[in-house]
């Protein structure tokens, strides 16, 4: 699939834009929601494409490892949007490990690729990420801590899939007398 290089370049550009605007703390979790079906111009969940999922995971792992961030990859609704993550991160953050192995038909291509390529993958039911990318309107908001802030990048789509980036900030607690840093 020759389009895969175009998808990769779009993803790299979007990530450079995102991290040019946001600095996540070392050791934080960055979540990916990804429909490879949407990337290739099909309806979400209809054409999971492992080669596209592998490219997305490889590209993210390269960039996130430089920034010392953990990647969590959301599966589809057939595994209740559980996430593939490295065991080290799950244990560090106290995320509860569940029993499922993502597949193309239950989890999707990105989660399957993550499970196959992570060094010690586990699946967890819930996480609290500092930020993330949603490729194909997969709804990652449930996995990003409050308060979520959308981030605009120059890339609005990867392939045919709409992209949304999120970051977060601490809640502002208090009233009219409160002082914020």
Image (tube, grey):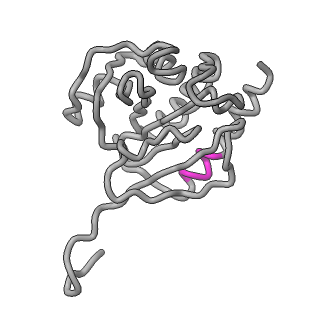
Q: How many marks?
A: 0
Quadrant containing the C terminus in the rendered view = bottom left
Does the magenta-highlighted stretch encompass residue 18?
yes
The N terminus lies in quadrant: top right
Expressed as whole percent of the image width and height from the top left, the position of residue 164 reads 55, 48
- Residue drawn at x 56%, y 25% is 45
Q: Is residue 114 above or below residue 165?
A: above
Residue pictured at 24% horizontal, 23% vertical: 97
| Between 134 and 8, the one nearer to me in the picture | 134
The quarter of the displayed image where residue 82 is located? top left
- Magenta: predominant secondary structure element? helix
How far from the left and from the top, in percent, is residue 9? 71, 37
Relative height, residue 167 to residue 30 (above, below): below
Q: Is residue 50 above or below residue 43?
A: above
Residue under the point 52% across and 24% down: 110
Q: Position of residue 33 (x, y in %)?
A: 49, 35
User: Magenta includes 38?
Assistant: no
Q: Residue at x 60, y 45 (%)?
A: 163
Q: Is residue 47 left or right of residue 180?
A: right
The residue sitting at the right extreme is 2
Residue 39 position by quadrant: top right
How far across and down, in percent of the image, does residue 50 sit?
60, 16
Magenta extent: 14-19
**Is residue 47 shown above or below 169?**
above
Q: Which of the 4 image quarters holds residue 7?
A: top right
Asked whether 139 or 150 is in front, the reply is 139
């Amino acid at each position: 699939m020759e389009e895969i290089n175009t998808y990769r370049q779009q993803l790299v550009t979007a990530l450079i834009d995102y991290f040019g605007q946001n600095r996540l703390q070392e050791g934080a979790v960055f979540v990916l929601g990804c429909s490879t079906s949407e990337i290739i111009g099909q309806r979400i969940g209809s054409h999971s494409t492992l080669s596209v999922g592998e490219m997305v995971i490889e590209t993210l792992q390269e960039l996130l490892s430089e920034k010392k961030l953990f990647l969590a990859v959301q599966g589809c609704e057939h595994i209740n949007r559980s996430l593939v993550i490295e065991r080290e991160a799950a244990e560090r953050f106290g995320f509860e490990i569940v029993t499922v192995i993502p597949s193309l038909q239950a989890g999707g291509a990105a989660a399957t690729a993550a499970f196959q390529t992570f060094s010690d993958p586990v699946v967890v039911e819930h996480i609290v990420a500092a930020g993330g990318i949603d490729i194909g309107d997969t709804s990652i908001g449930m996995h990003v801590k409050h308060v979520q802030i959308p981030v605009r990048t120059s890339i609005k789509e990867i392939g045919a899939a709409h992209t949304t980036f999120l970051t977060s900030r601490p809640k502002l607690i208090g009233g009219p007398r409160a002082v914020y840093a």
